[in-house]
Image: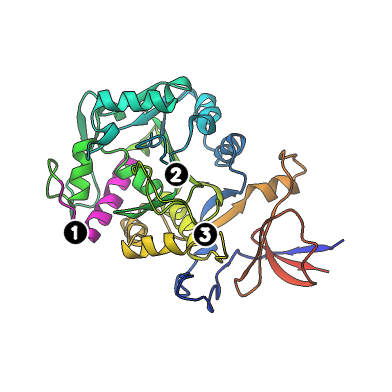
Amino acid sequence: MHKLYFLPFLWLMALSACAGNSPEEVQSSAYETTNDGIGSKVYFTSDISAASLVRIFEALGVSAEGKCVAVKISTGESSRANYLRPEFIKDLVQKLDANIVECNTAYGGSRGTTSAHRKAIAERGFNDIATVDIMDEEGTMQIPVTDTKHIQYDIVGSHLQNYDFMVNLAHFKGHAMGGFGGVLKNQSIGVAASSGKLYIHSAGRSSSRWMDDDQDGFLESMAAAAQAVHNYFKQEGKDIVYINVMNNLSVDCDCDGSPASPKMKDIGILASTDPVALDKACLDLVFNHQSVAGDDAGPLVRRIENKHGTHTVEYAEKLGLGTQHYTLIDIDQQAGADGVQTGKTNRYNVYSLDGKKLLTNASDLNGLPKGTYIVNGEKTIIE
């Protein structure tokens, strides 16, 4: 049996990751991870379950007691889309006595009007676990933006004013227009009313018709709108937290009724009080993933790169919404160290010191030769 010695170390998975990859395994060696221990805390669990969703929310240490709570999700364009299912989010939503909140889409489809959206919500089963509030059902309101380079305000559903606590619960995946969708998109496009969605997509030029020919302007408008919602919930008496679920990692968004099949395996759930650090941590896990047959990050990486998707995070940091620097905290490992039963077998993600992925979600370390590795984010000596 191996003896393990854990040494203080920052989880730098990609010091020289994928330097020898073929063109089909596009993990960009120039992409820099920022898990450097000098920024915000980002919590991680590899267990994608309803119980772990509750556990990672609790790890944030932010109380919603006495608050009127909104859980912002996407209800999905069709039953085939990869939206977060009611059975997965139920325990968290009911623990917080929260409403699920959404806004109507700007492109028509199954959620383009309130009546159609309510039908879709019922068909997806969300009414069975909570009250679902379509926030722009009774109109819109404007909230101020700090950055007026493109948009002069953020147009959101008027019901946003009814809430003093939000859980931004996003499905992290690709997106045909933004490159990827995480909490920043869920907070900007997702919280915007249908007219607000058009306003962001057009980089402030129209709230009544599609204009999507200014890609960086669109991405920067998303960052500005996300900051507006964050600032709204950072007023006295309000608060907001952020969770990304990295499963069903298709190149397509949940707004696509027939998304491409995921080529990359599920990763886990991540959470933070900093939306910039959270989305950056998820991007790091995608870009620094060591692809193998049946677990290929390449398509998602290419989708993000083709749409300049990382610019949203970079610009959000520039605006002061958060920092790209973070410390990743594995709550599965933390629970094991504290002697807490997590209800699942210990699992190990192992990298060599030069960033090469050796084991994914392994049940033991018995196949590893003696040496020094990065095991679940810590430098570890195996003897």
Q: Quadrant of the C terminus?
A: bottom right
**Residue that label 2 marks:** 171
Kindly identify which numbered label has been placed on residue 246. none
Q: Which SS class for mark 1?
A: loop
Determine the CA span between mark 3 and mark 1.
28 Å
Q: For mark 1, does the 10 Å Cα neighbourhood hold few (<14), some (14 to 19), or many (20 or more) residues?
A: few
Position of 1 with respect to 341 (left or right) is right
Kindly identify which numbered label has been placed on residue 285. 3
Q: Amino acid at mark 3?
A: Leu
Tags 3 and 1 touching, CB below 8 Å: no
Indicate whether 294 appears above or below 171.
Answer: below
Q: Position of residue 174 (x, y in %)?
A: 39, 53
Q: For mark 3, does the 10 Å Cα neighbourhood hold few (<14), some (14 to 19), or many (20 or more) residues?
A: some
Determine the CA span between mark 2 and mark 3.
15 Å
- Please name the residue shown 52% across and 28% down the image: 90
Position of 228 with respect to 2 (left or right) is left
Residue 369, picture quadrant: bottom right
Stretch in magenta: 210-229
Q: Position of residue 4 (x, y in %)?
A: 80, 62
Q: Amino acid at mark 1?
A: Asp
